Amino acid sequence: MAYLVLSNGQIFEGRRIGAPVERIGELVFTTGMVGYLETLTDPSYYGQIVTHSFPLIGNYGVIEEDFEGKSALFGYIVRELCDTPSNFRSQYALDDYLKRQGIPGLCGVDTREIVRITREEGVMNAMICDAVPGDLSAIRNFAVVNAVKSVTCAEKQVYPAEGGEKYRVALLDYGAKRNIIRSLQARGCRVTVWPAATPAETVLAEDPDGIMLSNGPGDPKENTGCIAEIKKLLGQKPVFGICLGHQLTALALGGDTVKLKYGHRGGNQPVRDLTTGRTWITSQNHGYAVVADSLNGVGRQTFVNANDGSCEGMAYPDYHCFTVQFHPEACSGPKDTGFLFDRFIAMMGGVRRA
């Protein structure tokens, strides 16, 4: 047996899965009913111990083709782990993946109670361990730091367009999910992925038709260098920001961000389009939000979360830029807002490559 020890002193007993190591992280939950592979391989979970609210995880095994990136989470908590996956695409069991990646986890835990505690008390730190520590100060003092530096690519990478090159897009990698790249490739874009700290001058020197600012983990305000470079990029080319890219753009333009009580994580987040009044179901994974009022006179709020009213999108017409908090590239879904990539393509329409 092993334990999940919360920073508030509550203890959950469970059975070990994954790597036999002890680790402290920020305890969060996701409400997705499918897509556990995408959750495990989303770099935006860096530093976090992820709890699944859905009770059965692992039933379709591990399919490496569906990975979104390199796993960065610190721990994994499930109610029931399936050790006999049934899927013709499955390559091996989920527990094997956790062991290979060095991720500790627990199963047989009351995940419903963990989610209830997190919703009522807010995100807190926790520890996966074999024995309950007498002193909880190490758990309480933990903080997620250097998140983007830990997940960004080490060097420039180029991905060719599918079906003929129409546009060239520079993607700043703050922890980018692979399906952002795939979504652009499918629309005829050659994608050049740059490390997060790349100077704006280096990016612009290759004369891209547009710039993507990716998702990523951690507190957006920690990334002062990235924010400074985004300031130089805005207004130079069409810009589309997703998740952390949305937050960093707001900060670059003088706005503010705040930490949410327990964040939005899962594939069932309702978002209202303030232009059309239509509500979209979106995939999300973030713990911070842009304060829309802090950008009055600079940008216009375009989407709002239908549950808590937090900002889900901004438009900055003077800078030829728009950003969203949710994931239009969502994989395993929902795919309702994929049209935003088409909007980005339309913004680049003045320059077509032969």
Image (spheres, rainbow, N blue to C red):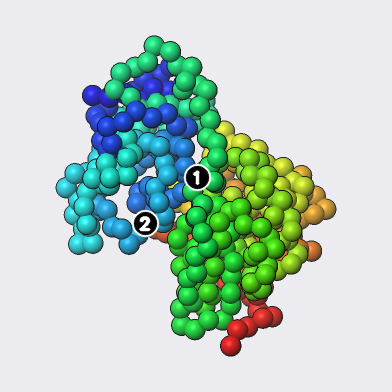
Q: Is residue 119 above or below residue 83?
A: above
* Mark 1 burial class by Cα count in 10 Å: few <14, some 14-19, many 20+: some
Q: Residue furthest right?
A: 297
Instruction: Specify the farthest residue to the top.
Output: 134
Q: Quadrant of the C terminus?
A: bottom right
| Residue placed most toward the observer, 263 or 238 | 238
Q: Residue at x 19, y 44 (%)?
A: 83
Alpha carbon of mark 2 to alpha carbon of mark 1: how far? Answer: 18 Å
From this viewpoint, is residue 181 visible? yes
Q: How many marks?
A: 2
Local secondary structure at mark 2: loop
Residue 184 location (% of width, % of height): 52, 70
- Residue beneath disc 1: 150
Q: Amino acid under label 1?
A: Ser
Q: Quadrant of residue 15?
A: top left
Secondary structure of residue under mark 1: helix
Which label number is shown at residue 213?
none
Numbered badge on residue 67: 2
Q: Amino acid at mark 2?
A: Phe
Q: Quadrant of residue 88?
A: bottom left
Q: Nearer the viewer, residue 271 or 81?
A: 81
Q: What is the quadrant of the N terminus in the image? A: top left
